Image (cartoon, rainbow, N blue to C red):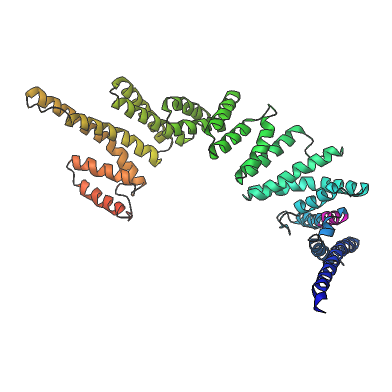
């Protein structure tokens, strides 16, 4: 008897497997019947829609149901009905929540699998196309809501499905909400953008490159490809597409700012000034642009000072002062601009101090006079810096660099306030916070 045990068990297992397959096909039919009952009388048979959903979800876990175009059509019809029920509620209350995460996507996937099924009958394919046409607009709308909620991967999945829906409809000479070329191109772009935001870079490039290859890509496409190439470490390709974009769209702000960031990273300060000035022309209320341009000229000033090019150093110093000043004029409480203008004078004083300390010892009348002139020049620069540091401290009493500068200037002036700022400086260095500023706005 023992020698028949394993064959018998195998037979029982096979019989169970066949039964499971049969159950899947039956469940799909039962789901369709439950949906029909709901459609006949939605009020009296409200529970039938939930039953239909449960049965089709269970059925499509089985290989036999998965092989049937009719089962996938049933899924599409059930999830379409669920979505339409939600849409009816939104006719009364625009903020009514959707019961599913994206029933339009599930419905589309069902119709698409029915359409792609090699054994699908002609009428089944026709029904699938009709279902896809019904879902196309909903896929876009739900994708937009997902994007706005920063659920970028879900938005991408919905947008991608809308483009696939368009392909099916075009192949069957059916109307599509994306028949207009501009609308279609925009949908391709936002699909790539959603993938980009979801960090699905290969997918994003697929859609960006589709538009790029057309030869009529908008500036945003060049910017998108540039950003992905930069983020994935392909600097050469990033700069190539940026250069193309800048040449094609010289007035586009997004590409201009991308170029500015490249110059900043590479330290190409001379090139950067021109780009920043163009940016200021386009966004004259953007305070950060003025501060950044001031910083660039500040760096150029310091470079020329080290190279002993006094003429250029003086020119760049004045430019830095001008743009920091313009930033403060537009926003007197911009701490970065206020501090930076103080630091400009402070650093010039520090350079002059080094030059003074490097003078040879000369106790002659002429030598002492020269030394005094330099001391007066240094203190004059510190005095010019002081009001800006005082203002900066009133805006942020815990900025380390501001406190260092105030402590140093007051110590040089032999002012007792140096003790106050040393105490405040020690508090911050020790990890604490000054409760209030010493100077008031």
Q: Where's residue 78, x and y in %?
A: 83, 58
Q: Nearer the viewer, residue 185 or 334?
A: 185
Q: Is residue 278 left or right of residue 202?
A: left
Q: Residue furthest toward the bottom? A: 1
Residue 108 can be seen, yes or no = yes
Snapshot quadrant of residue 227: top right
Residue 156 image point, x, y percent:
68, 46
Q: From what the image shows, is residue 423 above or below residue 11?
A: above
Evaluate whether residue 175 shows in this view.
no
116 over 32 or under it: above or below? above
Is 220 magenta? The answer is no
In the image, residue 37 sits, relative to residue 194, either above or below, namely below
Bounds of the magenta segment? 70-78
Numbered marks: total: 0
Image quarter where the C terminus lies is: top left
Q: Farthest residue toward the top? A: 311
Residue at 85% x, 57% y is 71
Q: Is residue 405 left or right of residue 56?
A: left
Examine the residues drawn in magenta and state their main secondary structure. Answer: helix
Picture quarter with the N terminus: bottom right
Left or right: residue 192 versus residue 409 is right
Q: Position of residue 266 (x, y in %)?
A: 44, 31
Q: Is residue 73 magenta?
A: yes
Q: Tell me the residue at 34%/49% (across/down).
A: 398
- Toward which corner of the image does residue 234 lie, by quadrant? top right
Which x, y percent locates residue 72? 83, 54
> Which one is nearer the viewer's eye here, 145 or 328?
145
Q: Nearer the viewer, residue 241 or 323?
A: 241
């Amino acid at each position: 008897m023992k020698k028949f045990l394993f064959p018998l068990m195998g037979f029982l297992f096979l019989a169970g497997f066949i039964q499971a397959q049969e159950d899947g096909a039956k469940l799909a039919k039962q789901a369709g019947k439950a949906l029909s009952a709901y459609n006949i009388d939605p009020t009296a048979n409200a529970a039938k829609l939930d039953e239909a959903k449960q049965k089709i979800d269970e059925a499509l876990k089985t290989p036999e149901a998965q092989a049937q175009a009719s089962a996938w059509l049933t899924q599409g019809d059930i999830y379409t009905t669920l979505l339409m029920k939600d849409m009816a509620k939104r006719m009364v209350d625009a903020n009514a929540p959707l019961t599913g995460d994206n029933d339009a996507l599930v419905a589309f996937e069902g119709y698409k699998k029915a359409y792609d099924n090699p054994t699908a009958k002609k009428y089944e394919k026709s029904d699938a196309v009709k279902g896809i046409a019904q879902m196309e607009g909903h896929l876009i709308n739900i994708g937009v809501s997902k994007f706005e909620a920063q659920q970028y991967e879900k938005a991408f999945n919905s947008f991608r499905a809308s483009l696939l829906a368009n392909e099916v409809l075009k192949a069957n000479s059916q109307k599509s909400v994306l028949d207009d070329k501009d609308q279609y191109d925009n949908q391709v772009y936002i699909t790539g953008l959603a993938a980009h935001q979801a960090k699905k870079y290969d997918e994003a490039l697929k859609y960006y490159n589709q538009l790029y290859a057309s030869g009529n890509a908008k500036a945003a496409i060049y910017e998108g490809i540039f950003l992905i190439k930069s983020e994935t470490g392909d600097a050469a390709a990033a700069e190539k597409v940026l250069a193309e974009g800048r040449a094609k769209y010289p007035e586009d702000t997004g590409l201009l700012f991308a170029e500015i960031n490249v110059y900043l990273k590479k330290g190409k300060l001379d090139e950067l000034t021109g780009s920043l000035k163009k940016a200021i022309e386009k966004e004259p209320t953007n305070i950060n642009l003025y501060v950044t341009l001031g910083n660039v000229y500040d760096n150029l000033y310091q470079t020329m000072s080290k190279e002993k090019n006094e003429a250029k150093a003086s020119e760049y110093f004045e430019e830095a002062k001008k743009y920091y000043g313009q930033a403060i004029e537009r926003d007197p409480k911009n701490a970065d601009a206020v501090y930076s203008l103080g630091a400009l004078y402070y650093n010039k004083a520090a350079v002059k101090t080094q030059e003074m300390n490097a003078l040879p010892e000369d106790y002659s009348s002429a030598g002492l006079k020269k030394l005094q002139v330099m001391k007066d020049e240094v203190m004059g620069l510190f005095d010019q810096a002081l009001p800006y540091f005082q203002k900066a401290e009133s805006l942020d009493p815990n900025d380390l660099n501001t406190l260092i500068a105030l402590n140093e200037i007051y110590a040089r002036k032999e002012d007792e306030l140096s003790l106050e700022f040393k105490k405040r400086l020690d508090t911050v260095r020790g990890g604490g916070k000054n409760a209030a500023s010493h100077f008031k706005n």
